[in-house]
Amino acid sequence: MNKRVRVRFAPSPTGGLHLGGVRTVLFNYLFAKKHGGDFILRIEDTDQSRFVPGAEDYIVQTLNWCGMIPDESPVVGGPFAPYRQSERKESYKQYATTLINAGHAYYAFDTPTELEEMRNHFKTSENPSPQYNHAIRAKMRNSLSLDAAEVAALLSANTPYVVRIKMPDHEEVTFTDMIRGEVSFNTSQVDDKVLLKADGMPTYHLAVVVDDYLMKISHAFRGEEWLPSAPVHVLLWKYLGWQNEMPEWAHLPLILKPDGHGKLSKRDGDRLGFPVFAMDWTDPKTNEKAIGFKERGFLPEAFVNLLVVLGWNDGTDQEIFSMAELIEKFSIDRVHKGGAKFDYEKAKWFNAEWIKNADNAYLAGLVQPYFDAAGIVVNDPAYLQKIIGITKERCILLPDFITQAGFYFSAPTQIDTASIAPKWDENKKNFFEALCMAFENSNSNDPLELENIFKALTATHGLKAGELMLPMRIMLVGGKFGPGVFEIAATIGISDTVARIKHALTLL
Ligand code: GLU
């Protein structure tokens, strides 16, 4: 690559980050890091009506959580600051003027009512929502249809106007997409998009081209939903005389609903009970809350891993990748063209794998907030790490540690006696009373020795070990879960083991 690689993630701060958005960040980030380039965060906040307070901070936090820290951003600044488009407002107007002077754009004075009338007037069953385009512009009030004196009078009277691109009739616009190869559009299919709004703010179409140029962006990755806008952008690069600087485009395939029908939406997550956003998000206007992968108990490493395989593989069967490995292996020509179905069960599998292989001290730090919330008190950090080591193979999501490990710190408050009661009798009661005594006499913390004591005693009572193990487990942990029962007894210690059995006996 001869040009310095500079890529950007350019979100509009309109709400929580959908996992498709985070995957776009990830592909940007991996590409930049692989080529020793720069990863830029640019906030595209020119649409004031869609601005949502808190959304920018949320984006920054999400990137931090995933370990994808931008080299340049509104937070750290950089040589092309500012990185918020609302703060660059003044720079866009001159480019709109350049385009008007060159005959590639024009002033349009149509009021919202006039636009509405136009839509009603030209509406047909084949074309239910007519667009402002080459066929219609001559019938509207703009600097192409009105005479020069009238335009000058309207401008000097400060009549509100927008600037629109003048799309050529029947021209083929072609560019090479890194994922799709050659893509062509006929310009007569595309409307005369607004470039500058009545409030003086640019639209996305103008701002994205100007900023990608000024910020020397070499490669632009964005969602496939932007493909129909690409001909407008390609023409703007050409009309502004920058075509040799145009970034290479990559339009990323969608992440699809689990059944493969259509784009995965937040509503699918609500309906099917899984997160679609990276982190919890509460809409400040509606107070509507969306759950995030982070708070559900996903490790950031697992989140990155499950995202990358939604649309990419390295050509082998490998599924588990660390960020460092991804930076080394990522290549854009292995990004799939088709959409990738989201599978929440598979997503959880990635998390379980990452938990299983994670360092105990690292997991302890992640589990602690869940324990705090559940009121589980950890006095000894080394003991917590040990317990995490024993239980992590059984945990899929971080909150699973509350169930799988909480009983190592305090006696269970709920004991599933209902599962013991149907087969309970006096003989079993006697057995457990004798077991308590035998355990106390041994004062052992060796699981094997405890097991031997247990087995010897079952024989004395004419019982089978198999019918007593589950009751003992339930007495110690509260339910039918956890690692080996003698491991548990040895870890919590004889006095706690005996106390829990005795307490359970009072309930039976
Ligand atoms: N602001 C656009 C969005 O919200 C960015 C698209 C692009 O990356 O060009 O998706």
Image (cartoon, rainbow, N blue to C red):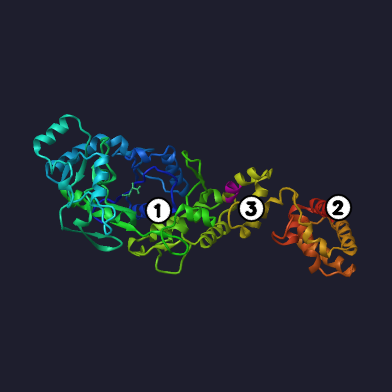
Q: Name the residue under label 3.
A: 401
- Name which quarter of the figure residue 221 lies in: bottom left
SS label for mark 2: helix
Give the spatial CA distance, label 3 vs label 2: 28 Å
Q: Position of residue 131 (x, y in %)?
A: 24, 51
- 46 or 157: nearer the viewer: 157
Q: Residue 445 carries which label?
A: none
SS label for mark 1: helix
What is the magenta segment's predominant secondary structure?
Answer: helix
- 133 or 112: nearer the viewer: 112
Q: Mark 1 points at which residue?
A: 26
- Residue drawn at point x = 68 percent, y = 49 percent: 383
- Residue drawn at point x = 57 percent, y = 54 percent: 359
Give the spatial CA distance, label 1 vs label 2: 56 Å
| Residue type for callout 3 | Phe
Category of crowding for the residue at label 3, using alpha-carbon neighbours closer than 10 angstroms: few (below 14), some (14–19), many (at least 20): many
Q: Mark 2 points at which residue?
A: 506
Q: Give the range drawn in magenta.
A: 363-367
In front of the other: label 1 or label 2? 2
Q: On the rendered structure, is 456 left or right of 476?
A: right
| Magenta run includes residue 235 | no
Q: On the rendered structure, is 91 left or right of 392?
A: left
- 199 or 442: nearer the viewer: 199
Q: How many marks?
A: 3
| Residue type for callout 2 | Thr
Give the spatial CA distance, label 1 vs label 3: 29 Å
Tags 1 and 2 in contact by the CB under 8 Å rule?
Answer: no
Q: Earlier in the sequence, mark 1 or mark 2?
A: 1
